[in-house]
Amino acid sequence: MKYIKMLQAWLLKTRHFKAEVLWGVGILVGALLLIKIVGRLVLGTTFLGFGTIIKALLLYMVIIFVIRFAEIKLKK
């Protein structure tokens, strides 16, 4: 029960959704590209293709919008 209340408090907290999404996308893209570049330089091969990076970004966006939808529903 404690965790449910903590989750509800987090979801109901006032935030700037656009800024959070942009920071998250920026950090995710930076991390994935860094892994790709370091893999290419060190091992001569890439761990991640660009298709994988795009899929990770799409998954991130879906998760963020589901959380946002839950926020909106809880505020009503």
Image (cartoon, rainbow, N blue to C red):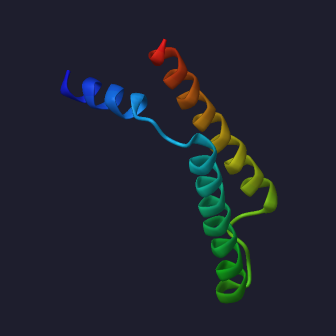
**Foreground residue, 71 or 66?**
71
**Foreground residue, 56 or 70?**
70
Q: Residue furthest bottom?
A: 42
Q: Residue furthest top?
A: 76
The quadrant of the picture occupied by the N terminus is top left
Q: Residue furthest left?
A: 2
Task: Give the image quarter of residue 14.
Answer: top left
Residue 10 locus on image (x, y percent): 36, 34
Q: Is residue 47 above or below residue 56?
A: below
Seen at 42% across and 30% down, the residue is: 11
Residue 50 lies left or right of residue 34; in this view the side is: right
Residue 76 lies left or right of residue 48; in this view the side is: left
Seen at 80% across and 54% down, the residue is: 51
Seen at 77% across and 62% down, the residue is: 49
Task: Give the image quarter of residue 35.
Answer: bottom right
**Foreground residue, 41 or 61?**
61
Q: Is residue 52 above or below residue 2?
A: below
Q: Is residue 22 above or below residue 75?
A: below
Residue 22 locus on image (x, y percent): 65, 53
Task: Give the image quarter of residue 46.
Answer: bottom right
Seen at 73% across and 85% down, the residue is: 44
